[in-house]
Image: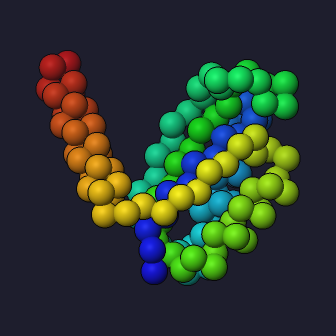
Amino acid sequence: MRHYETVFILSPVLSSEQIKASIDKYRSFLVGRNATITHEEEIGLKPLSYPIKHKKSGVYHLIEFISESSLIKDLEVTYARDEEVLRFLTFVLDKHALAHNMTRRSDAGKKESKKAVAV
């Protein structure tokens, strides 16, 4: 079992219900194949560096999970067949990347709590 992180970009023309349905589809895909989701981040609508399929922005979503390596090929084939997905990237997290992600999340949590106290 290895740690992975996958980021996919959905078309910006989708409704919020369609976006949620797509995200749920990939979450269910992973859980249905015995992957354990450790972290999920809805990054949201961001501009693209260059147009993809005539779109200048996309809805980004990140899922960090633990799984067997055989799952990755199936996941990427599913992404490639989905017309709502503009781009995707899945990669293995080593111990340094895992430590960085943990630090980044804890720093973000500290910033959020400071904002809540300041208001």
In the image, residue 10 above or below residue 80: above
| Residue drawn 45% across the image and 74% down it | 2
Q: Split into 4 quadrants, where in the image is the C terminus?
A: top left
- Based on the displayed image, in which of its 4 quarters is residue 10 positioned? top right
Answer left or right for 25 relative to 40.
Answer: right
| Residue drawn 75% across the image and 56% down it | 79
| Residue drawn 30% across the image and 57% down it | 96
In the image, residue 102 above or below residue 48: below
In the image, residue 56 above or below residue 60: above
Answer left or right for 66 relative to 83.
Answer: left
Residue 74 coordinates in the image, percent (x, y): 72, 71
Residue 53 visible: yes
Residue 115 coordinates in the image, percent (x, y): 21, 24
Residue 20 visible: no
* Foreground pick, 35 / 23: 35
Count of numbered labels shown in the rendering:
0
Residue 62 coordinates in the image, percent (x, y): 52, 48
Here the colouring is rainbow
* Foreground pick, 47 / 69: 69
Q: Split into 4 quadrants, where in the image is the N terminus?
A: bottom left
| Residue drawn 62% across the image and 51% down it | 89
In the image, residue 55 above or below residue 63: above
Residue 64 coordinates in the image, percent (x, y): 46, 59
